[in-house]
Amino acid sequence: MRMQHAENVVRARPAHITLSGSDSVELYLLGKVFYSRVIDADNTMGLVKVHGPSEKNRLITVPMDTVVEIGIGRLNDGYYRTRAKVVGATTTPDPMLVLAVDAERTQRVERRSYFRITMPVEIEYQFNENTGEENLYYTARLSNISGGGLLFHDEKLLGAPLHTGDLMQVRLRLPSSDACIQVIGTIVHRRPNAGGVPGLALRFITDNRTQDRIIRHIFEFERRHLLQHGS
């Protein structure tokens, strides 16, 4: 599963947060973001053990005393950022980093776009009324999604008279819920995939409540994926 960072920070304020073995974390390191999970945490001492970062099944070596930024997402609560220093590392039996967390730098960050995540689910979309097919929904495969928008690809888009700024209705059935989320999106750009299948990137036009529902489902999908497949 490939995830991409797409942060849009609106407001940050000092905060306090405790970590536990159930938390998913983002490690900002070497100009990239790596997705990991907390193994153990001593919040009194400010020490956290996390799975070591890897890329394409290759372990990333992180020198001692390296300063990293970590991000922690909490369902129904928000997203937190802080700094930490690498004070220990192991490669066997499981790659692990020991981080000394700077609790005084922890901030709760409001970011509406959040991160993009590859989520293999189907969506239904509806062309705008200018095409004359305003009542017909088509099914397509979702490529990725964030709290701020989505990308999907479908052969039926080939030759469709669509332009940047056009509106589309989209129905989402996310894996962590049976409920259907219906949103309006504006076309940002057209983007074919590697196989040449046409695609559309949409930016959501919706209220905060609906956007928060989408973000919660993304969190839950990420959490389940990490529990099943590891970091």
Image (cartoon, grey):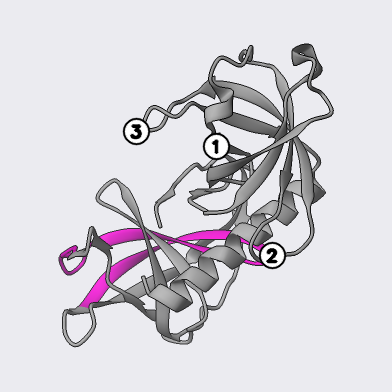
Residue 54 lies in what quarter of the image?
Answer: bottom left
Would you place residue 131 above or below residue 80 in this image? above
Q: Which residues are magenta?
A: 59-88
Give the x, y percent position of residue 64. 17, 69
Whether 69 is among the magenta residues is yes
Residue drawn at (61%, 15%) of the image: 164
| Label 2 – label 3 distance at C-alpha | 37 Å
Which label is found at residue 152? 1
| Label 1 – label 3 distance at C-alpha | 13 Å
Q: For the residue carrying disc 2, how many other residues have a C-alpha within 10 Å: few (<14), some (14-19), or many (20+)? A: few
Which label is found at residue 227? none
- For the stretch drawn in magenta, the main secondary structure is strand
Q: Between label 2 and label 3, give the one nearer the viewer.
A: 3
Q: For the residue carrying disc 3, how many other residues have a C-alpha within 10 Å: few (<14), some (14-19), or many (20+)? A: few
Would you place residue 88 above or below residue 189 in this image? below
Residue drawn at (28%, 65%) of the image: 53
- Looking at the image, which is closer to me, 36 or 86? 36
Which label is found at residue 194? 3
Q: For the residue carrying disc 1, how many other residues have a C-alpha within 10 Å: few (<14), some (14-19), or many (20+)? A: many
Q: Looking at the image, can residue 111 be seen?
A: no
Q: Earlier in the sequence, mark 2 or mark 1?
A: 2
Residue drawn at (35%, 76%) of the image: 50
Residue drawn at (73%, 53%) of the image: 212
Label 3 residue SS: loop
- In the image, farthest residue toward the right: 135
